[in-house]
């Protein structure tokens, strides 16, 4: 029904906004971390950052 359509659009809009905020936040953090040149360390930081956002590889099976 119309109710479901509105709900779906609302969820999608929120998700798009969320991804936008995440991208902006990560980009800002990277600007501050431009002194980090160790790829492994940077990769680890990314994993931690994503975990904090609750987006760490869903279904990956390697989550702590």
Image (cartoon, grey):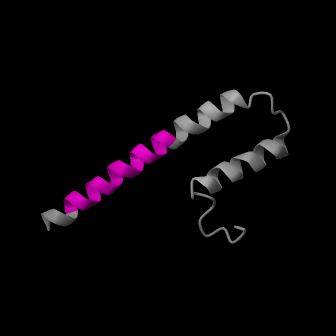
Residue 58 located left or right of residue 16: right
How many numbered marks does the figure carry? 0
Residue 61 located left or right of residue 9: right
> Mainly helix, strand or loop, the magenta region?
helix
Residue in view at x 81 percent, y 33 percent? 36
Residue 18, image x and y in percent? 44, 47
Give the vertical position of 34 relative to 19 (above or below). above
Residue in view at x 77 percent, y 50 percent? 44
Q: Quadrant of the C terminus?
A: bottom right
Q: Which residue lies furthest to the left in this view?
A: 2
Of 53 and 11, the residue lying toward us? 53
**Which picture quadrant has residue 6?**
bottom left
Residue in view at x 48 percent, y 40 percent? 21
Residue 54 located left or right of residue 48: left
Residue 50, image x and y in percent? 63, 52
Residue 13, image x and y in percent? 33, 48
Residue 13 located left or right of residue 34: left
Give the vertical position of 28 relative to 53 (above or below). above
Q: Is residue 9 magenta?
A: yes
Q: In which quarter of the image is the N terminus?
A: bottom left
Residue in view at x 70 percent, y 67 percent? 63
Q: Is residue 30 magenta?
A: no
Residue 41, image x and y in percent? 82, 44
Question: Which residues lie in the magenta part?
Answer: 5-21
**Which picture quadrant has residue 34?**
top right
């Amino acid at each position: 029904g119309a109710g479901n359509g509105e709900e779906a659009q609302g969820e999608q809009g929120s998700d798009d906004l969320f991804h936008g905020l995440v991208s902006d936040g990560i980009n800002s953090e990277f600007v501050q971390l431009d002194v980090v040149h160790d790829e492994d360390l940077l990769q680890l930081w990314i994993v931690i950052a994503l975990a904090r956002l609750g987006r760490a590889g869903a279904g990956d099976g390697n989550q702590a």
